[in-house]
Amino acid sequence: MGMVSEFKEFIARGNVLDLAVGVVIGAAFGKIVTALVDGIVMPIVGVALGGVSVSDWKYVLRPETVDAAGAKVAEVAIAYGAFIQTLIDFLIIAFVIFLVVKAYNRMRTPTAEVLAAPPEDVLLLREIRDSLRR
């Protein structure tokens, strides 16, 4: 019964729910960024590079051929353009997450005024000192 109660305590802490929400939001955000990159960024890059879609970039190792029986043999190619597009997706997502975490940490960090406030025991000792002077 110890393991079951530990598991209930783990679930009750809320960390699992927070993690699940983060994963779902992250997946949805990834779809948004992929749509942004596929629909806006990469077409602009393709136009700048002469009208070629970056995702179509590839290095052909063996071109498509027709064998003696008349059947087509598919080409063998390294599709590095799709990798570059996925890399751009990742960099944009990582940058935006960095900005969100940075903003969250800035809001979470106490201001300098709060940090400069003396501890309660020091305030109490000052009150005692001031009352003894009177």
Image (tube, rainbow, N blue to C red):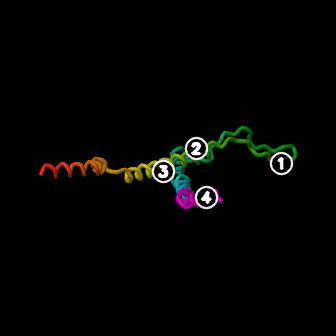
Q: Kindly identify the amino acid type of the residue bearing the numbered disc 1.
A: Ala
Q: Earlier in the sequence, mark 4 or mark 3?
A: 4
In front here: 74 or 30? 30
Instruction: Tell me the residue that label 2 is attached to.
Output: 84
Is the residue marked by circle 3 packed among few (<14), some (14-19), or many (20+) residues within 10 Å?
some
Q: Position of residue 127 (x, y in %)?
A: 20, 52
Task: Residue at 54%, 56% (x, y): give it.
Answer: 26
Of the numbered discs in the image, which one, if any, rests on residue 71?
A: 1
Task: Residue at 41%, 50% (x, y): give it.
Answer: 105
Work out which residue is located at the far top of the displayed protein and give it.
61
Tell me the distance, in whole angstroms, between the alpha carbons under discs 3 and 1: 49 Å
State which mark lies toward you, 4 or 3: 4
Q: Secondary structure at mark 2?
A: helix
In the image, is 40 to the left or to the right of 77?
left
State which mark lies toward you, 4 or 2: 4
Q: Kindly identify the amino acid type of the residue bearing the numbered disc 3.
A: Ile
Q: Kindly identify the amino acid type of the residue bearing the numbered disc 4.
A: Phe
Of the numbered discs in the image, which one, if any, rests on residue 91?
A: none
Tell me the distance, in whole angstroms, between the alpha carbons under discs 4 and 2: 42 Å
Task: Write down the region rendered in magenta.
Answer: 1-24
Residue 64 falls within the magenta-colored stretch: no
Q: Earlier in the sequence, mark 1 or mark 4?
A: 4
Instruction: Tell me the residue that label 4 is attached to.
Output: 7
What secondary structure do most residues of the magenta stretch adopt? helix
Q: Earlier in the sequence, mark 4 or mark 2?
A: 4
Q: Secondary structure at mark 4?
A: helix
Q: Earlier in the sequence, mark 3 or mark 2?
A: 2
Q: Position of residue 88 (x, y in %)?
A: 54, 46
State which mark lies toward you, 1 or 2: 2
Tell me the distance, in whole angstroms, between the alpha carbons under discs 1 and 4: 59 Å
Work out which residue is located at the far right of the displayed protein and give it.
69
Q: Secondary structure at mark 3?
A: helix
